[in-house]
Image: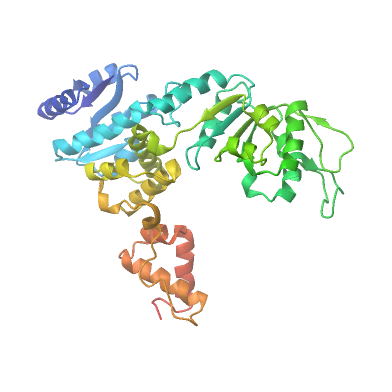
């Protein structure tokens, strides 16, 4: 795949083409707008480097060919280029190293797309690509799938991928986290109940299995349910019928089941915590997702994906990771897996002022939730005063930047603004 270049200045085009060639990529240089527009094609070009003099070309190229990533360059306000569709803007003059780094980030994101061309699923590591190859064969079938892996490895993303590529994709996708619901309520959540079935049942309620009729149901953390409920679940899977609590007859339901667990399910079976017959019913197609530390080729592509995601959501320019920041990400063990990586990148994007994320802004594990100075108060201090003291001390530590303060405090910018308005209305504009 080539990298197209468009700039009025022949020397700039020549220099950039030389850098691209040194990177092992194929440059396609243009100084003429019409020739560029006549040649640009997603089958031949994955990235377009366009001078911001051609803002209309940036916008048009992205609208017609959304799969082509655009790197804008020039003296315009970068936000205008981002709004037009560019992934990044380099202000002239820029160094060759800066150009290489930004282009490499874009290329990593492009090359991380899986074989099935679902851009939301990042799989640069061969182990994950093999999983996708299996999923593409399994998805069109009706076979139950059991996804095993540590918390945060992306089990639910895989479940959605299966549903999206199945014959049931036009039907409902219903997920339920079985670990988040008390066991006493799970039966009614899964199967529903009839009006008057118990105290408080003032109306008939449809359960998750009925909601999934014609589609897919995800039983997230299936090993968390009691052995008694496992027997009822097994019957539903075998007979494709459910009994609402308090109902006199069964209802037929048509669903495909996907289950996940972060536990050693074979060990649970040996200890009598999970029924072997239910396991065999769920485990027709086993998918074991490796932890992020075992698929390090995914780390930087995932980081680039999350950078783009945060930039789009917040309306900010995409930032690049410095070489030292990349080393830090690659050297960490990621106990929280992909979920932790997303949190680290989001925090780093928001707290970084410049175009490049430095290593000292990246914090891992408990470092990311350290209490700001002044977070503790003497005995007898009210909760209200502690909260106010924490907010003002955090704001002071980030020079009054409300967005950064909200991130450190773990609250939304709207909540922070409301708190400050509340203090202002009470005449509490500073710590007292």
Question: For the point 41% across and 44% down, which residue is it?
Answer: 342
Image coordinates for residue 52, horizontal then vertical, percent: 24, 35
Residue sticking out furthest to the right: 248
Image quadrant in which the C terminus is located: bottom left
Q: With respect to residue 118, does 208 lie above or below?
A: below
Compare residues 339 and 7 and report the one nearer the observer.
339
Compare residues 300 and 107 and report the one nearer the observer.
300
Residue 31 visible in the displayed image: no
Image quadrant in which the N terminus is located: top left
Compare residues 358 and 184 and report the one nearer the observer.
184
Q: With respect to residue 107, does 178 lie above or below?
A: below
Left or right: 371 as drawn, with respect to 72: right
Question: For the point 39% across and 60% down, which residue is it?
Answer: 408
Left or right: 144 as drawn, with respect to 202: left
Image coordinates for residue 19, horizontal then vertical, percent: 15, 28
Image coordinates for residue 168, horizontal then vertical, percent: 63, 24
Question: For the point 82% across and 54% down, which residue is it?
Answer: 200
Q: How is the image coloured?
A: rainbow
Residue 255 visible in the displayed image: yes
Residue sticking out furthest to the left: 11
Query: How many labels were placed on the picture?
Result: 0
Q: With respect to residue 49, does 76 lie above or below?
A: below
Residue 13 location, quadrant: top left
Residue sticking out furthest to the front: 270
Image coordinates for residue 421, horizontal then vertical, percent: 46, 69
């Amino acid at each position: 795949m080539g990298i197209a270049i468009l700039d009025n200045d022949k020397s700039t085009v020549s220099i950039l083409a030389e850098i691209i060639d040194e990177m092992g990529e194929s440059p396609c240089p243009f100084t003429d707008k019409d020739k560029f527009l006549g040649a640009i094609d997603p089958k031949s070009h994955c990235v377009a480097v366009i001078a911001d003099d051609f803002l209309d070309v940036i916008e048009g190229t992205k609208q017609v060919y959304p799969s082509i990533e655009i790197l804008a360059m020039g003296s315009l306000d970068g936000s205008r280029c981002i709004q037009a569709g560019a992934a990044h803007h380099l202000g002239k003059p820029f160094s060759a190293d800066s150009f290489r780094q930004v282009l490499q980030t874009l290329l990593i994101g492009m090359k991380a797309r899986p074989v099935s061309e679902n851009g939301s699923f990042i799989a640069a590591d061969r182990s994950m690509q093999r999983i996708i190859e299996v999923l593409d064969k399994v998805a069109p079938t009706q076979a139950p799938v059991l996804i095993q892996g540590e918390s945060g490895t992306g089990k639910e993303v895989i479940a959605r991928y299966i549903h999206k590529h199945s014959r049931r994709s036009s039907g409902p996708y219903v997920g339920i986290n079985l670990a988040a619901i008390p066991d006493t309520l799970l039966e009614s959540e899964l199967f529903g109940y009839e009006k008057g079935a118990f105290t408080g049942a003032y109306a008939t309620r449809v359960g998750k299995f009925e909601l999934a009729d014609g589609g897919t149901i995800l039983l997230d953390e299936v090993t968390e349910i009691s052995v008694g409920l496992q027997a009822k679940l097994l019957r539903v899977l075998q007979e494709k019928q459910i009994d609402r609590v308090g109902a006199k007859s069964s209802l037929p339901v048509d669903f495909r089941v996907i289950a996940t667990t972060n536990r050693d399910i074979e060990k649970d079976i040996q200890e009598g915590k999970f029924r072997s017959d239910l396991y065999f019913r769920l485990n027709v197609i086993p998918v074991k997702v490796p932890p992020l530390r075992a698929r390090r080729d995914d780390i930087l592509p995932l980081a680039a994906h999350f950078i783009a995601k945060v930039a789009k959501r917040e309306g900010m320019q995409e930032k690049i990771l410095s070489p030292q920041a990349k080393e830090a990400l690659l050297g960490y063990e990621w106990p929280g897996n992909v979920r932790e990586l997303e949190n680290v990148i989001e925090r780093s994007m928001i707290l970084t002022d410049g175009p490049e994320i430095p290593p000292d802004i990246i914090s891992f594990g408990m470092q990311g939730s350290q209490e700001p100075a002044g977070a503790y108060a003497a005995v007898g201090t009210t909760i209200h005063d502690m909260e106010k003291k924490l907010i003002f001390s955090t704001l002071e530590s980030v020079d009054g930047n409300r967005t950064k303060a909200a991130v450190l405090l773990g609250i939304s910018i709207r909540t922070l603004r409301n708190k400050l308005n509340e203090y202002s209305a009470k005449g509490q504009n500073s710590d007292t």
